[in-house]
Image (spheres, helix red, strand yellow):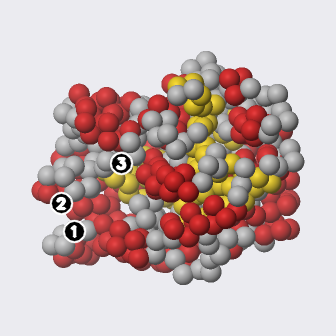
């Protein structure tokens, strides 16, 4: 049978794994892709006018119907959910091709998704086996019953049925390598930065994160499952032969959280792959030994999620228990190891966040002096723990939470979510953080901050980030910029 995936804005490892898994079992797959250059998920420029000007929704609908697949599949994060709904509805108005929705938004709140009668199926959690069994069930020569497919939600006789969840996939080495050609044949520049997972799951359950959902749904299971070092190396050797990447990005939620695994992996990586790489980790995880191993293997940039310099915010709101002292030690481990770029994540707009919290954040970032600070404005996602906190604090109403569940994301920088004065405070704080990376000179930074403070905007702050990326020769960010004008074969 033939599955047509429809997606927007970025490479998607989940779809790539589904595609290779289904192909291994005799099915065919294809992809319609919206590059989403200026859409809500855009890395550099989010502009609704430009996004509408480059809209290709009607082309996608036409091609989807003309392809006559056996199943059309949408993978949804909350930010792309409304876009997916719009396309699915248009397709259903002109065709009876079965439609299935999956992804973290569906896993978080399947009951909202199935309110839309043009969606025939939904898949919660990991989708490989559920999608395979769904295709077998749709094949009229099969005896597979919809009611026996774990992770599946389906509609029958006017009622929605929720099948139980299946356990996590434990042996990741049994999965085929992700089908990169599905995306790279559309946008070649993505192959320059080869994105790979060596594990699934996260040991932490931060209140704002999708892993908060998984920890709630799979309470009695081991959330972190790792591929063997040999299996990862085999994929990367194939990637070098086929795609000739310049950089490897390990996109695990927390890379290097197992020292024995890393001690086995790094020598193999140095011998067989030898490409520069970057990765993400947690300030409570990185040690002096792991930092040294990462550097010896070719790690040129490490990203550490700090989110706030206020221990109160981290502990009481984000469920992050590391102290500022531990964060400083973590950064020092990376710096002592000689890792070229130290990048940190910072979240702005936390409910109950005070001026004192912002000052503590700035003081910590000034103390650790990272090379790059990626600033995010807190966005609320369905069924995450932070929603209840925000509601109790009077930041969100029940009506607003209902809108979040429907895919209308809410974050403090959005119009109407906070007062203009407070929004201006956050924008100025973001400017100061970006300038902190650009210059270590207090006088110059204060001078620039004063000038830019008269016109606080995210566009200005993104501009500073781009200048800093060029100064640091930050290939990762520069590649996002090159993506804007790179050749694309879409949809």
Which residue sits at x=59%, y=66%? 62
Quarter assignment of residue 272: bottom right
Where residue 138 appears, x then y in whole percent?
74, 38
**Disc 3 and disc 2: Cα gap in Å?**
20 Å
**Disc 3 and disc 1: Cα gap in Å?**
23 Å
Q: Nearer the observer, disc 3 or disc 2?
A: 3
Which residue sits at x=46%, y=55%? 86
Circle 1 packing at 10 Å, graded few (<14), some (14-19), many (20+), is many
The residue that label 2 is drawn on is 424
User: Mark 2 touching mark 1, by CB under 8 A?
Assistant: yes
On screen, 390 above or below 263? above
The residue that label 3 is drawn on is 409
Kind of element beneath mark 2: helix
The residue that label 1 is drawn on is 456
| In this rendering, position of residue 304 left or right of residue 140 | left
Where residue 97 appears, x then y in whole percent?
64, 50
């Amino acid at each position: 049978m033939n599955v047509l995936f429809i997606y927007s804005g970025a490479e998607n490892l989940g779809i790539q794994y589904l595609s290779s898994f289904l192909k291994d079992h005799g099915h065919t797959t294809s992809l319609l892709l919206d590059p989403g250059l200026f859409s809500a998920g855009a890395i550099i420029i989010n502009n609704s006018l430009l996004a509408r000007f480059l809209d290709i929704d009607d082309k996608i609908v036409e091609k989807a119907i003309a392809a006559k697949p056996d199943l059309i599949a949408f993978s949804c994060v909350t930010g792309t959910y409304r876009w997916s709904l719009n396309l699915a509805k248009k397709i259903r108005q002109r065709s009876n091709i079965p439609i299935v929705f999956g992804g973290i938004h569906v896993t978080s709140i399947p009951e909202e998704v199935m309110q839309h009668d043009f969606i025939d199926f939904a898949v919660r959690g990991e989708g490989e086996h559920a999608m395979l069994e769904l295709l077998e069930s749709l094949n009229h020569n099969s005896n597979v019953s919809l009611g026996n497919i774990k992770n599946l939600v389906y509609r029958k006789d006017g009622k929605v049925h929720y099948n139980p969840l299946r356990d996590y996939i434990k042996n990741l080495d049994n999965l085929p390598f992700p089908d990169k050609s599905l995306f790279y044949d559309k946008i070649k520049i993505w192959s320059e930065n080869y994105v790979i997972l060596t594990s699934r799951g996260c040991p932490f359950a931060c209140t704002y994160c999708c892993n908060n959902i998984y920890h709630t749904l799979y309470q009695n299971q081991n959330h972190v499952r790792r591929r063997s070092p040999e299996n990862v190396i085999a994929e990367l050797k194939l990637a070098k032969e086929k795609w000739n990447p310049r950089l490897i990005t390990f996109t695990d939620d927390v890379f290097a959280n197992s020292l024995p695994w890393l001690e086995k992996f790094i020598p193999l990586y140095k011998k067989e792959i030898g490409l520069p790489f970057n990765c993400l980790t947690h300030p409570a995880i990185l040690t002096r030994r792991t930092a040294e191993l990462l550097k010896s293997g070719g790690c040129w940039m490490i990203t550490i999620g700090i989110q706030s310099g206020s221990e109160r915010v981290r502990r009481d709101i984000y469920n992050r228990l590391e102290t500022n002292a531990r964060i400083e030690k973590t950064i020092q481990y990376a710096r002592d190891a000689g890792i070229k770029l130290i990048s940190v994540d910072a979240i702005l707009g936390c409910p109950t966040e005070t001026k004192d919290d912002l000052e503590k954040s700035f003081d910590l970032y000034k103390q650790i002096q990272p090379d790059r600070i990626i600033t995010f404005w807190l966005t609320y996602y369905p069924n995450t723990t932070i929603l209840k906190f925000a509601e109790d604090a009077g930041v969100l109403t029940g009506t607003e939470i209902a809108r979040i569940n429907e895919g209308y994301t809410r974050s403090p920088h959005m119009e109407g979510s906070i007062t203009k004065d407070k929004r201006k405070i956050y924008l100025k704080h973001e400017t100061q953080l970006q300038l902190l990376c650009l210059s270590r000179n207090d006088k110059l930074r204060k001078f620039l901050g004063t000038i830019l403070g008269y016109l606080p905007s995210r566009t200005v702050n993104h501009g500073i980030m781009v200048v800093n990326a060029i100064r640091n020769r930050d290939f990762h960010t520069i590649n996002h910029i090159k993506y804007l004008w790179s050749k694309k074969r879409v949809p």
